[in-house]
Each structure stands twice: as structure tokens, then as C-alpha cells.
């Protein structure tokens, strides 16, 4: 198998996020957009030019006091 060219890729960074938070974030932005959102937040937090605070979902998704059964009941 050929070695992957990673010169254009950012290095992997370990990030510890509890499973319930990671799953709720995936539900809010889509499983493949979580990393993009974290990068956007970091750029905004660092006050880099032309970076705006990432948009939030209109309502809470998961979180303290919201179990999967509670969420299912809210979803209908």
C-alpha cells in the first residue's frame, strides 16, 4: 500500500470530549463537520482577522438533564 502524502494535512491532535457531547455536536452540525466547527471556534476565539463566531443551533441539542429518551420525546 502506498504511503499517504500528508504534507497538506494538518497533524492529528488528540481532543477529549465526552461521548454525549460529541454525539450532540454531530447531531447539531453533522458528523463530518465537527472538526470544521472546532477550527472555526478557535479562529474566532483567537480574534484572527475576518473570523466570526460560529453560528449556534436555534435550540439546545442534548446536554445536562436531557437524556436520549427526553430528546426522542421532544423530537416527536
Image (cartoon, rainbow, N blue to C red):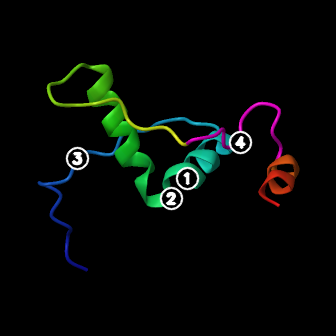
Q: Are marks 3 and 2 in contact (CB under 8 Å)?
A: no
Nearer to us: label 4 or label 2: 4
Task: Say if the magenta span includes residue 65.
Answer: yes
Q: Which residue is mark 1?
A: 26
Q: CA distance from mark 4 to mark 2?
A: 15 Å
Q: CA distance from mark 3 to mark 2?
A: 19 Å
Q: Is residue 75 left or right of residue 56?
A: right
Marked residue nearer the N-terminal end (1 or 2): 1
Q: Is residue 45 above or below residue 18?
A: above
Residues in magenta? 58-67
Task: Count residues near mark 3 (Cα–Cα under 10 Å), then give few for <14, some for 14-19, many for 20+.
Answer: few
Task: Count residues near mark 2 (Cα–Cα under 10 Å), then give few for <14, some for 14-19, many for 20+.
Answer: few
Pick the residue in front: 74 or 38.
Answer: 74
* Residue 76 pos. (x, y %): 83, 61
The residue shown at (63%, 50%) is: 23
What label does residue 62 carry, if any?
A: 4
Q: Which residue is mark 3?
A: 10
Task: Report the quarter where the N terminus lies.
Answer: bottom left
Task: Count residues near mark 4 (Cα–Cα under 10 Å), then give few for <14, some for 14-19, many for 20+.
Answer: some
Amino acid at each position: 500500500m502506498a504511503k499517504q502524502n500528508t504534507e497538506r494535512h494538518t497533524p492529528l491532535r488528540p481532543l477529549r470530549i465526552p461521548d454525549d457531547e460529541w454525539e450532540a455536536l454531530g447531531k447539531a452540525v453533522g458528523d463530518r463537520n465537527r472538526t470544521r466547527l472546532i477550527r472555526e471556534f478557535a479562529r474566532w476565539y483567537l480574534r484572527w482577522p475576518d473570523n466570526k463566531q460560529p453560528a449556534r443551533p436555534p435550540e439546545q441539542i442534548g446536554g445536562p438533564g436531557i437524556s436520549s429518551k427526553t430528546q426522542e420525546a421532544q423530537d416527536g
